Each structure stands twice: as C-alpha cells, then as structure tokens.
C-alpha cells in the first residue's frame, strides 16, 4: 500500500523558464522526485516485512534508506511550492521582520543562504528553517536530503543544490543557478510556512 504519492506540480514544467528549463523541471519532478516517493514507500514496505519475520538484519540500511527518501520527498514537495513564475523581490510583514531580527538584514540573510547553497560539498540543500526551541530563524546546510540538520527544525525555504537541479543548464556554475533561484521565490508561500511554524 502506497503511503506517499507524488504531488502535482503547481505550474507547468516550462513555467520557470528561462531560469530553469522545462527539461530540467520535468526530469526533476517526474523522475527524481518520483524516485524518492517510491523509495520511501518501498522502504516502509520492507520494514513491515522485517517486523513480520522478526528479522532485523537489514534494519540499519532500511532506516537510512527511509530517512533519505522520505526527506527527499518532503524537501522537493516544499521546493516546488517555494518557487513561482511570479516570484522574486523580497518578503514583507512578519517574515521580513523576523529575517531582520535574526539575521540583521535581508541582504545578510540572502548572503548566508546563498553561501550555504553554493557551498554544499557534493549533494544537498541550503535551507531557511524555523528552530522552535530557540524560537528563531536559522540557515541550515543539508547533506544529501537528511544530514546535518538540527532536530525538529521546520524548513520554510529550500534551495536544491543537487547537480540534477541545474547541471543540464548551468553546467558546473552552481552560483549562477542559485542567483536565479532568488528571482523565483514565492514569498507568500514562505510567509505562510513561517506563520504556520511559529503558531504551531
Ligand atoms: Mn532535487
């Protein structure tokens, strides 16, 4: 039984051109994201089999595979919604105030998230997240999909730094791709996630 399913894209694959080509977006959603959904469902199924048999010899690998694929599913589901053909500019309201409070200025925040995304070693993500214990915004740098994050943080804005996200168009120049991402950010979506996280 499938527990997770691939969400529809909120816009056409070509909608983010010229910043991101339709070819990249289609492969990214229909192949890469779909594979994470399948991987999460498959690992849950294999965990259920292990329980039924009382055989946990493969447990360590299954837990790791589940964490990787579930996190990939979660992050991509947020990523599509964080972007919009009508995005760009800067946030306003409570989110803008919180960014200034926790990073000093929007420009300082932008520089840190840009550095976190462009500086990922190998595959990963740059993320703006809400950290509920200290009740503050933080920038995190995720390895793969599930490493190097503080427990219980809530991702609000995620930038995919995997080569599959840009290499067909930007080749090895990840900074150019990240610079274009800022022109696509749907701040209304980020602000709604911020409101939900802070009031939870
Ligand atoms: Mn990706």
Image (cartoon, rainbow, N blue to C red):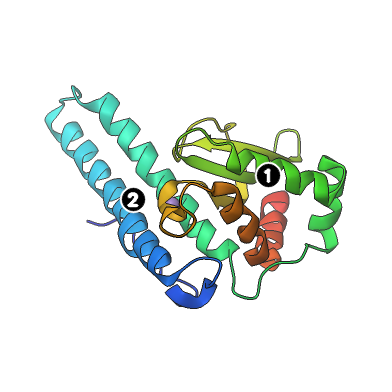
Q: Position of residue 13 (x, y in %)?
A: 43, 73
| Residue at 34% over, 31% down | 64
Task: Tell me if mark 2 has few (under 14), some (14-19) or many (20+) residues whose alpha carbon lies within 10 angstroms of its own.
Answer: many
* Quadrant in the picture for residue 93: bottom right
Q: CA distance from mark 1 to mark 2?
A: 25 Å
**Left of 131 or right of it: where is 95?**
right
Residue 130 can be seen in this image: no
**Which residue is labeled 1 in the image?**
113
| Residue at 49% over, 40% down | 124
Q: Position of residue 145 (x, y in %)?
A: 45, 41
Task: Tell me if mark 1 has few (under 14), some (14-19) or many (20+) residues whose alpha carbon lies within 10 angstroms of its own.
Answer: many
Under circle 1, the secondary element is helix
**Left of 132 or right of it: where is 44?**
left
First along the sequence among labels 1 and 2: 2
Nearer to the camera, 76 or 134: 76
* Quadrant in the picture for residue 3: bottom left
Q: How many numbered tags mark residues here?
A: 2
Q: Position of residue 90 (x, y in %)?
A: 78, 62
* Quadrant in the picture for residue 120: top right
Pointer 1 with pointer 2, Cβ within 8 A: no
**Which quadrant is home to the N terminus?**
bottom left
Nearer to the camera, 200 or 44: 44
* Numbered tag placed on residue 36 in the rendering: 2
Image height of 126 relative to 199, above or below:
above
* Numbered tag placed on residue 71 in the rendering: none
| Residue at 65% over, 55% down | 179
Q: Position of residue 174 (x, y in %)?
A: 54, 48
């Amino acid at each position: 039984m499938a527990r997770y399913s691939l969400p529809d894209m909120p816009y056409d694959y070509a909608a983010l051109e010229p910043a991101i080509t339709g070819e990249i977006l289609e492969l990214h959603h229909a192949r890469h994201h779909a594979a994470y959904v399948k991987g999460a469902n498959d690992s849950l199924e294999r965990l259920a089999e292990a329980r039924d048999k009382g055989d946990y010899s493969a447990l360590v690998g299954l837990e790791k595979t589940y964490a990787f694929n579930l996190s990939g599913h979660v992050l991509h589901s947020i990523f599509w919604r964080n972007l919009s053909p009508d995005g760009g500019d800067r946030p306003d309201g409570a989110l803008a105030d919180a960014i200034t409070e926790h990073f000093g200025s929007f420009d300082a925040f932008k520089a840190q998230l840009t550095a976190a995304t462009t500086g990922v070693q190998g595959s990963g993500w740059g993320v703006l997240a809400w950290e509920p214990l200290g009740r503050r915004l933080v920038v995190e740098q995720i390895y793969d999909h599930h490493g190097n994050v503080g427990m219980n943080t809530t991702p609000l804005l995620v930038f995919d730094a995997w080569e599959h996200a840009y290499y067909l168009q930007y080749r090895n120049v990840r900074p150019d791709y990240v610079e274009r991402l800022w022109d696509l950010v749907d701040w209304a979506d980020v602000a709604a996630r911020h409101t939900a996280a802070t009031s939870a």
